[in-house]
Amino acid sequence: MPISRRKMLQSAAAGTFVLAPQVVAGQAPAQITNTQTGRKFKAFLRAGTGTTVEQLTLLPIHAREVVIRTEASAVCYTITGGVLRNNNAPRPQIPNHSGMGVVEAIGPEVRRVRVGDRVIIPGTPQCGVCYMCLQGRADWCQFLGTSPAHPVAKLANGTDVFEEAALGGFSEVMVVTEEYCCPVFTQVPGEELCLLGDTIGTGLAAAHNLAPIEPGTDVVVMGAGPVGMGAIQAARIKGAANVIVVEPIAYRRDIAMKVGATMVLDPNKEGMGLVAKIQDLCKGPTNNRYAGGRTWEAGDRIFAVPNGPDYTIEAVGGDQFEPKAEAGPDPTGILPIQQSFEFTRAGGHITMLGFSTRGNVSFPAWQFQNRGRTFHSGQQGGLHMLRDLPRYVKLIEKGEIDTKAMVTARYPLERTKEAVQAVADRTTLGAVITFPA
């Protein structure tokens, strides 16, 4: 049915967008009119000094915004403090900075997705036109943090409700700008796809985009949480000869061995001998310095000694809460960074993905200057989401990436706080909030 320009302009001025009258039989009225203003939905809120699940009313969307019916949202350790602490929240907010679901409405300026598309919503956008995107560092897209912090819904009493990081994944409905949307065309379950938007996707991207892992090399992954698990699988896919994982929690060491680790080490058991142990494991099969040998004899110049991994990926970070599973040797997260520097070989690569680390790291200046190591700082692992996420989906479909083993607990929206607590306690690896179709 044709629509006049005058009516379109009047609708836009009223905050109601009517576009593309391509109606599929059986669609809900909200999808036919392409407006969902007034829609009722439930969301998990952080409000005042606590949390609650409330029914909300959707406000009009903006021109470049997308309404998404959430399928699943993974719990990230970095949000546990914001959810579980009892400090006073200045305004009601829907937590979580990633998710995935189905597009149900779009604003008039949206071009990236269409109604009916399945989309992954990562914590880092990709506009494709800013300075950082054009320099190949879409993980630092300048659109990050510039979205208008406007309310997306109201409580029954009229109070405005906002989304954390302009995403708010713990909700039956997400409202995001199109720069955060990556369409994927697959039947992979949502509970697995949502992992690509943050934790697992970060580890995969780091080992593919930042650490130039080559076949036959030695890789050490510090930490086998969800981020580390992504790095372990990526190292295996890229053909690393050895993938040595350092992790204090026993059940995570077991899972690491199933998805690609060739050896696991307990940092509590190894203690101060961890650095020497890893260097010994990565010294190569011969003491001959020629024809590919790696170990140098005593008396040689120390900065040229090549013992140690070719690539180290640090994915530990600091503890926001004391874990109920096995605790690591340093709750600040500084020790794993220090050890990574010490055991990585001369000319090797160190990629840092940890979060919530507290304190400062100190390196001997002469080693920092002269040992030729390359450091990579991993904002979401260097993810280029429009390019990378569809590739990872294909690898999941082919069985190369195991996301089923990464989902270790499923929770309905009403048990979101319980899910966040389990992640804070580290008693589960991958907790996912799932929503009925």
Image: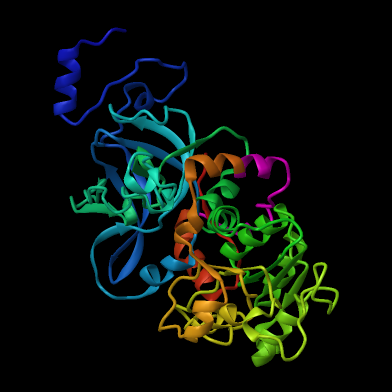
> In this picture, is 289 found above or below 201?
below
Q: Which residues are magenta?
A: 392-412
State yes or no: residue 45 in magenta: no
Q: Is residue 258 left or right of residue 10?
A: right
Q: Residue furthest top?
A: 2
**In this picture, is 410 found above or below 20?**
below
Q: Quadrant of residue 213?
A: bottom right
Q: Could you say which is closer to the camera, residue 212 or residue 407? A: 212
Q: Nearer the viewer, residue 241 or 327?
A: 241
Q: Position of residue 219 (x, y in %)?
A: 68, 67
Q: Quadrant of residue 9?
A: top left
Q: Residue at x 19, y 52 (%)?
A: 157
User: Taking 231 as reference, is 252 above or below it?
Assistant: below
Q: Residue at x 38, y 39 (%)?
A: 128
Viewport quadrant of the N terminus: top left
Count of number-bearing discs: 0
> Looking at the picture, how far across and down is residue 73, in whole percent?
49, 52
State whether residue 192 is above or below residue 37. Answer: below
- Confirm whether residue 331 shows in the render: no
Q: Position of residue 166 (x, y in %)?
A: 32, 51
Left or right? Give the position of 49 relative to 190: left
Quick check: 37 left or right of 405? left
Of the pair 172 and 251, the residue shown nearer to us:
251
Q: Residue at x 66, y 91 (%)?
A: 271
Q: Is residue 402 visible?
A: yes
